[in-house]
Image: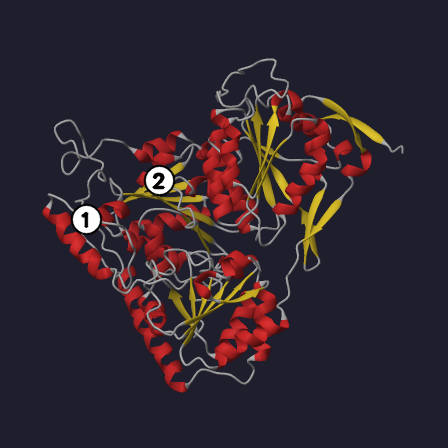
Amino acid sequence: MTYATVRLTVAQATIRFLINQYSERDGIEQRFFAGTFGIFGHGNVAGLGQALLQNELDPEPDGGAMPYYMPRNEQGQVNAAAAFATAKNRLQTMVCTSSIGPGALNMVTGAAVATTNRVPVLLLPSDQFATRYPDPVLQQIENPQTLDTTVNDAFRPVSVFFDRINRPEQLLPSLMQAMRALTDPADTGAVTLAMPQDVQAEAYDFPVEAFKKRVWHVRRDPLEKAALNRAVEIIRKAKKPLAIAGGGVIYSEASEELRAFATATGIPVADTQAGKGAINHDSPQSVGGVGSTGAASANGLADEADVVIGIGTRYSDFTTASHTQFKNPDVKFVNINVKAFDAVKNGGEMLVSDAREALVDLTEALADYRVSDEYAERIATVKEAWDKVVDECYHLDHQPLPSQLEVFGALNEMMGDEDVVINAAGSMPGDLQALWRAKTPVQYHVEYAFSTMGYEIPAAMGVKMALPDSEVVAIVGDGTYQMLPMEIATIVQERLKVIFVLLQNHGFASIGGLSESRGSQRFGTRYRMGADNPHNQEGDIVPVDLAANAESWGLNVLRVSTIAEFKDAYREAEKAERATMIYIETDLYGPNPPSTSWWDVPVSEVSRIESTQKAYEEHVEAKKPQRHYF
């Protein structure tokens, strides 16, 4: 059999193939890869780097352009790609390439972020020579057990698909499997194709047919009739049902259907970190965050619930409050999820389905069901009570330093419905889940599945690329800023207008508070001068000027001291045409929203420290409600 071929290197063929891949859902079609992030070294500069250069100089033969962006850190580029894919509801993503060895390994954390959050990113790390003539190649780790293992094998446990392209003939089947995984609504995440550096530059006669436009139809799995009937039977018997909206509702673009379901049935809806905004906060049925960092309104209802309807949630440790949140001994779970692995959690009735499709069917099937007037009154009461708590937290007038809660309140009141707040780690995600009032699915972007310090700055870049018309605001603590600030340079280089809010409290507020509550006295959590103060309890503040550092990266920095000044600075940053940072010092010691739940962090069973002994006694008591939901 003969067919038309085109002679390309493996790298050139990879780029040409990726340019011509499209996604489609609900009749909306778009190119799947919006561009490539790449940091080049000897492993990829003459392979994928050359292919990207060739495309930039002459894109027409490839079927179009593959935009290239130059990041500063390999982990940062993957975080940006994951944030971009999240903002695009997984219908579009970015490619990330790195050199061999340390460059590749730097992407592993980003891969875990993508896979844990169920968002697609394509990683093309370089690898050792397939021929093994140069052996060991520079930056290659040698394993005396086998010559077939490289550092890229570290991607296997954090990727939904992994392959190594040792010959040109392997490329096209592997790329097809990569696209299958990237566009799968249930099993997507990081896809890694390890690319030996010699193979990248090797030429081969590829079939022209392989590079024609291909559309990947992102399916909406319908709800099985029998499963629907079983779920309806359980819900109809419920006296105190509670729905929990997870990220799957937002990815499925099912917010309108969730609102209709809640309005028709009166069933209250709590949210996870990934699901906040799935239902607008001012809906009568919206009761706020649930779990370890949740609101008293949602957690009070969760304690009493006889049926929990999980919609697109994976039931993380925080959502279940380490399996202490749902205290009704007879509680039943009905779980709607595209991924059976998540739908079976807590021994729930499995509804393996797209969230939007299932909600439409459930609303219709429950047309004559509504919660009792007594329960509806209870929902309204707890919601009103928590709204008062939020207002108090947002307007504390805390002295002498502002509380971070007041900063959140100012932002929540000033940001537009389609603007985006970004955060990821520390005490801030907990405070935000408890307090933030999200009106739209777009507004709240908190990465808490992997809770990665250093996510916020590159994420701001990715989200702004995805949503250029939105004001993108990344709240960054001083701890996370020092983890990964270098993508600020990329943001400035690409002229991306984002706003950073840097909260300087000279320590790790979250882990400090956790340490104190578990008897470890905030050990190693303050930024204080050492030497004669080895565990940094007290002493002089470390004289690091993060605002000056941010200015050195090219940001416009506004230093403020009060909430009134912060509000003025935010309005100035809104009007600015370039990236701006607002720098404000806040109180390391809080206060935080009133806690209404628990998180299981083990405490030393024996200790010579009195505070640890006391914490262990409290831990034993707190564990008593803990149980498996199967």
Most foreground residue, 472 or 528 = 528
Looking at the rendering, in which quadrant would you find the N terminus?
A: top right
Residue drawn where x is 58% and y is 13% of the image: 134
Q: Is mark 1 in CB contact (under 8 Å) with mark 2?
A: no
Q: Residues within 10 Å of mark 2 (few under 14, many from 20)?
A: many
> Distance of mark 1 from mark 2, alpha carbons?
31 Å
- The residue identified by callout 1 is 605
Regarding mark 1 in the picture, which secondary structure is present there?
loop
Residue drawn where x is 54% and y is 77% of the image: 232
Query: How far from the left and from the top, in percent, is residue 595?
Result: 26, 61
**Mark 1 or mark 2, which has the lower sequence index?**
2
Most foreground residue, 56 or 49 = 49
Q: Answer with the quarter of the image where residue 317 lies.
A: bottom left
402, above or below 122, in the image: below
As drawn, the label of residue 368 is none
Q: Residues within 10 Å of mark 1 (few under 14, many from 20)?
A: few
Most foreground residue, 301 or 573 = 301
539, above or below 513, in the image: above
For the rendered model, the colour scheme is secondary structure
> Could you tell me how many numbered marks the image carries?
2
Q: Is residue 257 visible?
A: yes
As drawn, the label of residue 480 is 2
Residue lying at the far front of the rendered structure? 145
Looking at the rendering, in which quadrant would you find the C terminus?
A: bottom left
Query: How far from the left and from the top, in percent, is residue 486?
Result: 43, 32
Residue drawn where x is 86% and y is 32% of the image: 4
Residue lying at the far top of the rendered structure? 134
Q: Is residue 340 left or right of residue 20?
A: left
In front of the other: label 1 or label 2? 1
Q: Amino acid at mark 2?
A: Thr
Q: Amino acid at mark 1?
A: Glu
Q: Is residue 380 left or right of residue 617?
A: right
